[in-house]
Image (tube, helix red, strand yellow):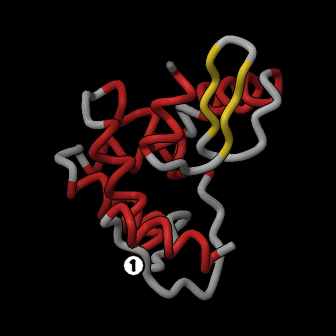
Amino acid sequence: MIKHLKIVAAAEGLPFGERTKTYNSRLAQEMAKWAETKGRGEDFHLTAFQAYFADGKNIAEMENLLEMAISVGLNPEEARKIIRDRNFSHAVDADWQLARHLEIRAVPTFLWGEQRLVGAQPYEVLRKFVA
């Protein structure tokens, strides 16, 4: 699977490093939900992708979460409080519940009516999917 991800990432010009461990992304998901409320969601998602997939950082550690927040212009003290108090855990729970309801088991999954397309796909495949 990692070999395939590297090929896809390279084809899309995305960074993909040599990760040797898998880390829990739950706290990063909660931070991302908060970042979305601050208009920094997309930037935070890209930063988390870079940190995890390219740099091999543990995105469950407070220090790394704060570094990511600062890098996208978020207040580090507010970020620390968001994680400490788990303010966005319910929002992430709701996202997970919706994914289970929709039977989404992989990312990305594209839904169009009753049709679904799973996994990173070339542009031409996506174009045909929505046509």
Q: Determine the residue positioned at 32% across, 59% down.
A: 68
**According to the image, label 1 marks what residue?**
55
Q: Quadrant of residue 54?
A: bottom left
Q: Is residue 37 above or below residue 30?
A: above
Q: Determine the residue positioned at 63% across, 70% down.
A: 23
**Of 19 and 10, the residue lying toward us:** 10
Whole-percent x, y for residue 25 in the image: 59, 57
Name of the residue lying farthest toward the left: 73
Q: Is residue 103 above or below residue 50?
A: above
**Which class describes the residues within 10 Å of circle 1: few (<14), some (14-19), or many (20+)?**
some
Q: Determine the residue positioned at 55% across, 51% down.
A: 120
Q: Quadrant of residue 14?
A: bottom left
Q: Is residue 65 above or below residue 31?
A: below
The secondary element bearing badge 1 is classed as loop
Q: Determine the residue positioned at 30% across, 52% down.
A: 69
**Of 100 and 75, the residue lying toward us:** 100
Whole-percent x, y for residue 27 in the image: 56, 51
In the picture, measured across the screen, residue 109 lies left or right of residue 9, that is right
Assign the N terminus to one quadrant of the image: bottom right
Whole-percent x, y for residue 31 in the image: 45, 43
**Of 121 and 5, the residue lying toward us:** 121
| Amino acid residing under circle 1 | Asp
In the picture, measured across the screen, residue 7 lies left or right of residue 44, that is right
In the picture, measured across the screen, residue 96 lies left or right of residue 27, that is right
Name of the residue lying farthest toward the top: 113
